[in-house]
Amino acid sequence: DAKTTQPNSMESNEEEPVHLPCNHSTISGTDYIHWYRQLPSQGPEYVIHGLTSNVNNRMASLAIAEDRKSSTLILHRATLRDAAVYYCILRAVTSQGAQKLVFGQGTRLTINP
Amino acid sequence: NAGVTQTPKFRVLKTGQSMTLLCAQDMNHEYMYWYRQDPGMGLRLIHYSVGEGTTAKGEVPDGYNVSRLKKQNFLLGLESAAPSQTSVYFCASRDSGTGGKNIQYFGAGTRLSVL
């Protein structure tokens, strides 16, 4: 399975933009980049995903490097409710050929009021 | 708007006891998954199912069994609980879309302590 590398923790201030980096130097050409987040005491929730082009949705933006070896999740205006662990995940396949998500340790984001 | 529902939310077991965790989804999803999450770590895949009547092993299947008798339900069983199975268990489901569409929807988790 291709591996992702993220900082263990980051801190930002409320109402400021947050850039969460992820390195995935072993990514293959068909791997989509997924981001999930896990709020305290909750299950993970989908944030965004992309392949090559930058992507935007109501939650965040995803900027993907031209060589696809890194990506950045951008929260344009962080709120206290964005405090969570953010996981950068590449699609993987089980030995039986089914798609799966492989979670690393993620980045714990703290938002200061 | 139920999505993925897990029961129970909390449970304390003694070593050697058995129990079943229930996961129910109302989105008509084909795929369902069971994960465990230990403190400070990401989720690890225990078992999964690609459709009614099918199950397969994930990364850490030992000590667990699963069944998918109905499409909407995925059961995780512990036949003889051990302290090493103290963890938070998450269920997830997704549709059978191909390509990049691999959005999994997660339940709120079951916190299990084995004494």
Image (cartoon, coloured by chain):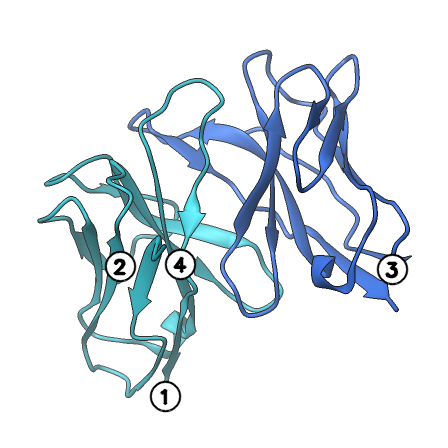
Q: Determine contact: label 2, label 4, CB under 8 Å.
A: yes
Q: Determine contact: label 2, label 3, CB under 8 Å.
A: no
Q: Determine contact: label 1, label 2, CB under 8 Å.
A: no
Asked if residue A18 is positioned above or below residue A13 in the image, the reply reads: above
Picture residue at 31% right of the left edge, 28% below the top: B96
Query: Could you confirm whether marks 3 and 4 are on the same chain?
Result: no
Q: Which chain is blue?
A: A
**In the displayed structure image, the side of residue A101 where residue B29 appears, left or right:** left
Picture residue at 77% right of the left edge, 13% below the top: A67
Percent from the top left, x then y, of residue A24? Answer: 70, 28
Whether residue A34 is visible to the viewer of this picture, yes or no, is no
Label 4 sits on residue: B107
Q: Earlier in the sequence, mark 1 or mark 4?
A: 4
Q: Earlier in the sequence, mark 2 or mark 4?
A: 2
Kind of residue at disc 1: Leu
Within-10-Å neighbours for mark 2: few <14, some 14–19, many 20+: many
Q: Say which quadrant the C terminus of chain A sits in.
A: bottom right
Asked if residue B48 is positioned above or below residue A41 in the image, the reply reads: above
Q: CA distance from mark 1 to mark 3?
A: 41 Å
Quarter occupied by residue B30: top left
Percent from the top left, x then y, of residue B54? Answer: 15, 39
Tell me the SS state at disc 3: loop
**In the displayed structure image, the side of residue B70 where residue B97 appears, left or right:** right
Label 1 sits on residue: B115
Which color was chain B given?
A: cyan
Query: Could you confirm whether marks 1 and 3 are on the same chain?
Result: no
Q: Nearer the viewer, mark 1 or mark 2?
A: 2
Label 2 sits on residue: B23
Query: Could you confirm whether marks 1 and 4 are on the same chain?
Result: yes
Label 3 sits on residue: A14
